[in-house]
Image (tube, rainbow, N blue to C red):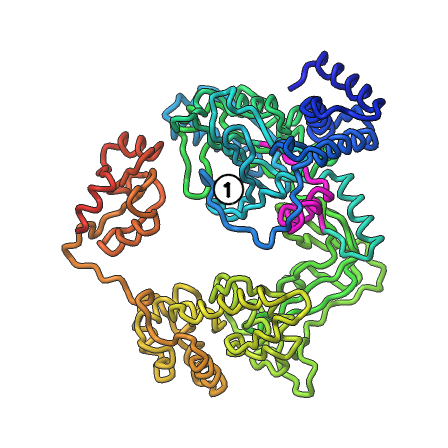
Amino acid sequence: MFSAKEQKQKYELSKSILKTESISPLDIESLRDLLKFHEWKYYVQNDPVLSDFEYDHLYKKLEQIEQDNPNLITPDSPTQRVASDLNEDFAPVAHTVPMLSLGNSYNAEDLYDFDKQIKKLTNLDPDLEIEYCIEPKFDGGSIALVYENDFLVRGATRGNGTMGEEMTPNAKAMPSIPLKAEFSKLGIVKAELRGEALIRKDNFEKINKERAKNGENLFANPRNAATGGLRMKDPNETRKRGLEAFIFQLGYAVDANGVDMLPTLKTHDKGIETMGELGFKIPISQRTVVKSIKGAIDFCAEWEAKRDDYEYEIDGMVVKVNSLELQERTGFTAHHPRWAIAYKFKAKQATTKMINIEYQVGKVGSITPVAKLDPVHIAGVTVSSVSLHNEEFITSKDLRIGDTVVVERAGDVIPYIVKSLADLRDGSEKPVQFPEFCPINHTENKVALLKEESEAAWRCPNCVCGAQDLQKIIFHVSKVAMDIDGFGKSYVEHFHEEGWLQDISDVYNLEYEKIAVLEGFGERSATKLEAAIEKAKKNPIHKLLHSLSIHHLGKKASKLIAQEINHVLDLRTWTEEDFTNIKDIGPVVAKNVIEYFAIPSNIEMLEKMESYGVNMSQTEADRPVEVADDAPFAGKTILFTGSLQKMGRKEAQELAVKNGAKNISAVSSNLDILVAGEKAGSKLKKATALGTVQIMSEDDFLELIK
């Protein structure tokens, strides 16, 4: 970004200004440029040429001029990185193009298969060597940055890949992200960049030492500290946390006429190099271009061996087809680009002592043993608890309290006990006696555990202590059940401790005035929670059935049953035959649902819920889709691609189902119809090449379903 000569000039000018008492407002632009240069040296190059004190001194000079002359403040001034207002909410925003996940590989064989698949998808000669770009798989928080007319206009988290949370003030607070970048020199008017927000390992240690000194909870790992930093309400706190952003892709770039400018870059590596020239932080020695998959395998192995020496946490490398034209031909699945794959490093292992075993109970009464360990550091995380799953797991591994065990963080995510080291036993270890009675229940009424022949877990069949009720409430409000937005586990536990939640029905009878005065809540939080609960009351009954935590009653079975009843309480009179007459409902589910609806307290709870306004009647969303024999797409498979102009993708898919079609996600010989919207890409090309797929426009599709 700056030549050696330019850097020397800026350094000498900085030293000169530091010696002066005051600086003229006429020189404000030069001062801004100097500060941007020093930000780049410090945060991007990690090679500062001024001390922190000297930088602060220059910064204060600029600050003073702008205070005296507010008309001279510009949006890209270094003083404008951190806004003074707080972000009360993080609004959802749509990414310009989806931020997809990556497929995973774990060994050289997986990468060879990936290479073969690329050649197969693009009809390349199997002996042809493909050029790949390899870069670190950073272990932080993914972000998307949008620039328009050279200025940073939006920063967002990855979210679900399609929608993220806007955090523009926090993005501006990260000095490694330029507030202005000269995309216009490349003919680009609007660009969306993808990157990863990280915290250096040494900086992370300093943060945790400071938190320990202040009596605050320690962060588990740099990734958690980074992702949490992206969502701080105060951008000043984001800046204090020391987040840095590495850019790993230019995902979208158009000129003033909306023409795609990405093809002009030719390769992925050229795109990254260009971002570096514009002042963004990019991987340099950690990134390379190789001429074959063998070169990619060797580079991944090299970095796996030295990952611990790198100053940032990485959990693998990403292998990408370098040619943008070949990327386009390779295409995407609904989940990930076919032209890129993550090479995951082997899980880290460590040995430690298993001090004790504690037990947890789930929503259907399953008892899970949890090993309490001497805390051990594995792949950037301190592990002190590990699930032992069930009694059979303990027995099969001959685990004893006091054992030295090998702990693995599988996939760098889930801690797992690999084995005990029997040779290190000294005789003080104790065999594990799995409890006969529920270990969670501390009332006088003991409850014997039971285990069904088809299951591995012991269960408490009759909760008398309330522990299962709490887990049922947590599940009931969760996203996969009633989906009460903002009603997380911590809220449930808090309200349970307050005595407000005893069973599921209490969720719909909360006193929001009391919630509003709780520490950490307030009237706004209480109002938002009330709105979310009122919305959930209108849910279709298949969601309600699934949310009741009836053993073995999953989403699919709940939908099948909801199609056949007018009211939830109709199930009180259903027999096993009524259930098993439904395709895919077996006797086990039938037995469990019948037992649930035979318990008076459950009926009483459901009746209370209905009195509080919770819907118990079949809705349109519960009823089966009726398709006429002469429906235009009866028996056909269909796929939508490109940008639809008259309806959303989800609406189009629903219309297709109502008219007899089955939606599928990929172009193959199983596809009958492809509906191509604007800017349809590789799927259209592939469908055309197959020659067996009927291709129609959005208007053609709508005409057929009139």
Residue 217: image quadrant is bottom right
Residue 581, above or below 329: below
Q: Determine if residue 315 is in view.
A: no
Residue 139 location (% of width, % of height): 64, 41
Q: Residue furthest top?
A: 5
Residue 563, above or below 636: below
Residue displayed at 75% across by 63% down: 400
Is 557 colored magenta in this rendering?
Answer: no
Residue 435 location (% of width, % of height): 68, 75
Residue 272 location (% of width, % of height): 56, 25
Looking at the image, which is closer to me, 263 or 623? Answer: 263
Residue 373 location (% of width, % of height): 76, 58
State left or right for residue 466 relative to residue 538: right
Residue displayed at 54% across by 46% down: 166
Write down the residue under mark 1. Answer: 101
Residue 372: image quadrant is bottom right
Crowding at mark 1 (Cα within 10 Å: few <14, some 14-19, many 20+)? some
State left or right for residue 557 relative to residue 506: left
Residue displayed at 71% across by 51% down: 407
Q: Determine if residue 641 is in view.
A: yes
| Label 1: which secondary element | loop
Region of the chain picked out in magenta, as a range: 220-247
